[in-house]
Image (cartoon, rainbow, N blue to C red):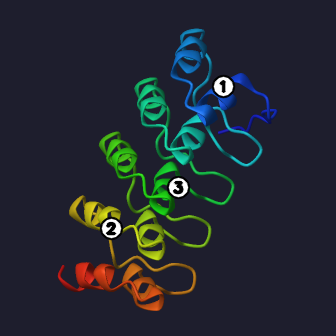
């Protein structure tokens, strides 16, 4: 996928960042490329997700935004949700085919992010949806190892009860 160096005032990126569904809908209907990436690899979907904009996320996914696009660091929209903690958006991304086991350039997965940031409802959701807890990051750590490092007792129990 080629990168598009969007300006900070790019209308599609601004509408996604602000969760402006009416403007997004207008831009999408005029054949805006919903999978365009800026110089950091962010897509409108990633910006909508990071902002916690459920309705804008739904609109972009319905317009065929690629749920598994990775930014220049290898992060996905689902990884962003997992450190932010937006459970409804995570469910929506998973429903639209988010790969639970994609790894970023450091080998981290969405499950690892949820564990690291104490988003235990998301940990539970992803485990129930098939996230692989045995994946190791670049440091050789699993999500359980991260839970132990962070003292995340609830996540430790979730992993140990698999």
The relative height of residue 10 versus residue 116 in the rendered view (above or below) is above
Residue 96 at x, y = what percent? 35, 39
Most distant residue in the top direction: 30
Most distant residue in the left direction: 161
Viewport quadrant of the C terminus: bottom left
Task: Tell me, yes or no, whether the two marked residues, 2 and 1, touch with CB atoms within 8 Å.
Answer: no
Residue found 45% across the figure and 28% down from its top: 64
Residue 53 at x, y = what percent? 49, 37
Query: Is the residue marked by circle 3 packed among few (<14), some (14-19), or many (20+) residues within 10 Å?
Result: many
Which residue in the structure is indicated by mark 2? 123
Task: Measure the alpha-carbon separation of dots 2 and 3.
Answer: 14 Å
Q: Secondary structure at mark 1?
A: helix
Image check: 8 left or right of 59?
right
Task: Measure the alpha-carbon separation of dots 2 and 1.
Answer: 31 Å
Task: Measure the alpha-carbon separation of dots 1 and 3.
Answer: 19 Å
Q: Secondary structure at mark 3?
A: helix
Location of residue 157 by image quarter: bottom left
């Amino acid at each position: 996928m080629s990168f598009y160096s969007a300006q900070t005032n790019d209308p599609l990126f601004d509408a996604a960042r602000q969760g402006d569904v009416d403007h997004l809908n207008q831009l999408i209907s005029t054949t805006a490329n919903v999978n365009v990436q800026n110089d950091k690899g962010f897509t409108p979907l990633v910006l909508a997700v990071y902002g916690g904009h459920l309705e804008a996320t739904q609109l972009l996914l319905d317009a065929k935004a690629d749920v598994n696009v990775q930014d220049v660091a290898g992060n996905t929209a689902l990884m962003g949700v997992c450190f932010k903690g937006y459970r409804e958006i995570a469910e929506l991304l998973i429903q639209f085919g988010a790969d639970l086991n994609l790894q970023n350039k450091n080998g981290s997965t969405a499950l690892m992010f949820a564990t690291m940031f104490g988003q235990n409802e998301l940990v539970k959701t992803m485990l129930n949806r098939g996230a692989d807890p045995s994946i190791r990051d670049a440091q050789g750590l699993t999500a359980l190892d991260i839970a132990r490092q962070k003292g995340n007792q609830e996540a430790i129990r979730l992993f140990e009860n698999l």
